[in-house]
Amino acid sequence: MKAMAFIKEKFDLIKVIITAVALITVTAIFHFVTPSDTARLLTYLLIYIFISYENFFECIEKLIKQPFNENFLMLVATVGAFVLGEYVEAVLVMLLYSIGELFEEYAEERSENAIVALTELMPEHAAVKQGDEIIEKKVDQVEVGDLLYLKAGDRVVCDGVVVRGNCSINDSMLTGESALKSVSVGDEIMSGTVVESGVLLVRVTATSNQSSASKIIKLVTEQSEKKAQGEKFIRKFAKIYTPIVIVAAVLVATVPLIFGQPFSEWFKRALNLLVISCPCALVISVPLAYFAGIGNAFKRGIIVKGGITLERASKINKVVFDKTGTLTYGRFRILDVLSVGDESEVMKIAASMERYSNHPIAVAILSGYQGEYYDDLNTQEIAGQGILSKGENAFAVGNAKLMSAIGVSAPEINEIGTVVYVAKNGEYLGAIVIGDSVKDCAAQVISGLYEKNYSVAMLTGDNGATAQAVAEQLGITDYNHSLLPEDKQKLIETYKKTANVAFVGDGINDAPSLASSHLAVAMGSGTDVASLCSDVILTDDDLKKLPVLFALSKKTQRIVKENVVFSISVKVAALVLSVLGFAPMWLAILSDVGVMALATLNSMRLLK
């Protein structure tokens, strides 16, 4: 049963593999064993039917609504190839077309998986306080006014206001920022947020289908559906080329009758025109160019999801970056240590107190400290404020609220980042500034994009001071801060009115913007949701690969256009000769096979 399910799920892929193996095997055998013309025709015809029967029926279904579609073009091309006796070429056209369809299906499946992944992040049940009892409710049954009971590790399922308790929360799903925030009575808290410590009672102000998290899911769903409607090159080409050829053939067969010409002669010329116009060279060389471009990108650590992605990338003129995890490393490190005395003592106390914590700030402090520790500390964590120790060494490590609560007079520090104050026996010793840092290559990449006449913008959920500091360091003048996911997505829509927009991000909060942009680029170390919503993945998080992607996409489009112009030029010349009666069948074959070979070699340049 499992084997049957697998075959059903991967049927299209299995069909492509079988066809490729059969084509290679049969062609190799026929190279050494010369079959009869009938046997050769029937063998390749069976392989052709196996790979193309679905396209044939799809073409019949679409003939009324959309007569000149890409399926019809494939049939015209391959039937023409069979008439010319180019059986391998006919099967190869359908094989390459089917591979292109697999890429398209893969991209659509990834978009659907992104929505599923987002949905699975949210719990199905919530703990609700009713009187003195805590009961469990389905999330969609939680109403405005209910009291959510939240403990450490719980994800908030509805937007609300804190009515009891104080703690640290992680709202990276919404803002993208890994820094924890403190909330207390009266503060708003949004769905998707994770409680890191303490216990909260939150009064619901918006039901689950109106909450912040549901808006993200809705935006991703809507934008993914819109994006899936994009047309690939061969589809656009089929709409123009196919009707022109058919109308031309009809005119060649009928117009001479008005002038008393013999029908049989001009009907034969019309058939020759259809055969010569068979666009096999074009149909093969275009996807080959895209496959070569995709292969080149993959060797460079850039995963590109299909030829249409390269086509979109070539048109981009505005690049919008998320900040955290994209332009910055997305992880905390020590930016500065301020002390009124011994700096090493400040670090020793902080590291000793944070020694057994997995908090991001604790990890940053410990990674920046190499010395000895104070042992046997009796510590107590104060939710949303910091850590205290009792006994001989009365240490305090935490934020300004903690210093104020224990009566320690600490100076206001205005540096960008999270400030961790350190006190001993009621006296202020110093502070450690923790923060994110800009990637080494980011300034170079931004500068290079400006030089290539791309416009650049930065969107972040972080505060204004931090956003300004990063933007100034990178030379970005267009930036917006304190943004929720829907705010980012609205700005992307605004940018799209005047530009072709690429968005580069890494977090769940970036998913709507990635889905909405013309080109979605995700960092390889980002969330699964971001990768699923993307068109391109930079596997090693190297921003220097972004200009490479744009240059490669432009070169791919240039080669595609060269193949199109060359193929059509030769075809037009052959067609004119055919209509005038000067094109024998050997010329038709030469024009088709010769053009295909040259266009294929041209496409292969992209592998270098």
Image: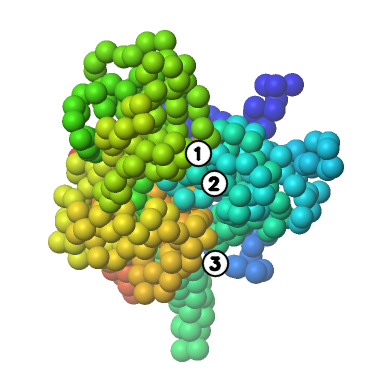
Query: Going by the image, does 495 lie left or right of 155?
Result: left
Q: Secondary structure at mark 1?
A: loop
- Using a 10 Å C-alpha cutoff, classify the residue at mark 3 as few (fewer than 14 neighbours), some (14 to 19) or many (20 or more): many
Is residue 325 visible from the viewing direction of this image? no
**Percent of width and height locating residue 210:** 68, 58
Q: Secondary structure at mark 3?
A: loop
Q: Which mark is residue 384?
A: 1
Q: Which mark is residue 68?
A: 3
**Would you identify the image quadrant in which residue 294 lies?**
top left
Q: Secondary structure at mark 2?
A: strand
Where is the C terminus found, in terms of image quarters? Answer: top left
Amino acid at pointer 3:
Phe
Residue located at (33% from left, 27% from top): 424
Judge whether 531 appears above or below 81 on screen.
above
Amino acid at pointer 1:
Gly
Amino acid at pointer 2:
Val
Query: Going by the image, does 63 lie left or right of 223?
Result: right
**Percent of width and height locating residue 465:** 31, 57
**Would you identify the image quadrant in which residue 7 lies?**
top right
Q: Earlier in the sequence, mark 2 or mark 1?
A: 2
Front disc: 3 or 2: 2
**Percent of width and height locating residue 276:** 39, 61
Q: State if disc 1 and disc 2 touch (CB < 8 Å).
A: yes
Q: Compute the Cα span from label 1 to label 3.
A: 64 Å
Q: Earlier in the sequence, mark 3 or mark 2?
A: 3
Residue closer to the observer: 424 or 551: 424
Query: Going by the image, does 397 lie left or right of 263?
Result: left
Judge whether 352 appears above or below 470 on screen.
above
Q: Compute the Cα span from label 2 to label 1.
A: 7 Å
The residue singled out by tag 2 in the image is 183
